[in-house]
Image (cartoon, rainbow, N blue to C red):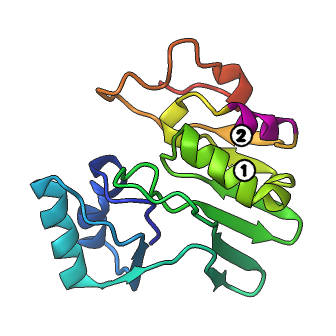
Amino acid sequence: VFITHAHPDHVGGLLELMKQITVESVFWNGQWPQDDDTALALSEIGEMTTLSVVKPDQKLPLGRTVILRTLKNGLHTGDMNDNSLVFGIEDGKTKVLLPGDIGHDRQVDLFRSENKWLSSISFLMWPHHGDTLAVEFSGLLKHVAQCAVSVGPNSYHLPEPGFNFLLVGTRFD
């Protein structure tokens, strides 16, 4: 299992899932959550399996043809969202970008450091549950064949008002 960062909306169901299936390892960025409930859940997960910290620009083969890569992070802050692992999945010419909850500053940093890789992505999981994109990052959309947004009821008021679900496909409420 790969998690971008240890916020409750990214780790919350993992403990229950692990009670139902065997998980060999959980790969994550190593930044411990600040809230007690999530920290406790992550500790329990660590007792059930191996917690492995993944470093930026690490490549992990998933089978014979698929490579999971963590993209570079030149911006290190105390903000868990901006410290999200950004995953790139490659299978031949197909590239998928899973940017976690990165905000504008991290999007710009990623765009500058990984522009070549990003210019050929085929699928984008929209960052931060439908939040707005940095101008540089939004330029990637001309290359993307498909987008998706992962969002449920939340107190963050996301996606942003006026978010264009037609851009990313069908909205399922």
Q: Quadrant of residue 89?
A: bottom right
Magenta stretch, residue numbers: 135-142
Say which label, 2 or 1, has the lower sequence index: 1
10 Å neighbourhood of mark 2: few (<14), some, or many (≥20)? some
* Residue 48, picture quadrant: bottom left
Q: Which amino acid, by three-letter code, is at mark 1?
A: Phe
Residue 43 is situated, as x and y percent measured from the top left of the image, at 17, 73
User: Is 173 a magenta residue?
Assistant: no
Q: How many marks?
A: 2
Asked if the residue under mark 1 is in contact with the one under mark 2, i.e. CB atoms within 8 Å, the reply is yes
Looking at the image, residue 130 lies above or below residue 39: above
Q: What element carries label 1?
A: helix
Disc 2 marks a residue whose amino acid type is: Phe
Q: Quadrant of residue 137?
A: top right
Where does the N terminus fall, quadrant-wise? bottom left
Decide if residue 116 is on the left or right side of residue 125: right
Q: Position of residue 160 (x, y in %)?
A: 50, 20
The answer to whether residue 99 is left or right of residue 168 is left
Q: Which residue lies furthest to the top in this view?
A: 162
Task: Identify residue for label 2.
Answer: 137
For image coordinates 19% across by 55% down, the residue present is 34
Would residue 117 be found to the left or right of residue 75 on screen?
A: right
- Mark 2 to mark 1: distance in Å? 6 Å
On the image, the x and y values in percent for residue 24 come to: 39, 86
Q: Nearer the viewer, residue 124 or 86?
A: 86
* Left or right of 120, for residue 25: left
Point out which mark residue 111 bears.
Answer: 1
Question: Where does residue 80 sit, x and y in percent of width and height?
Answer: 36, 53
From the viewer's side, name the closer residue of 173 and 11: 11
Q: Tell me the SS state at disc 2.
A: helix
Taking the spot 48% from the left edge, 78% from the top edge, the residue there is 54
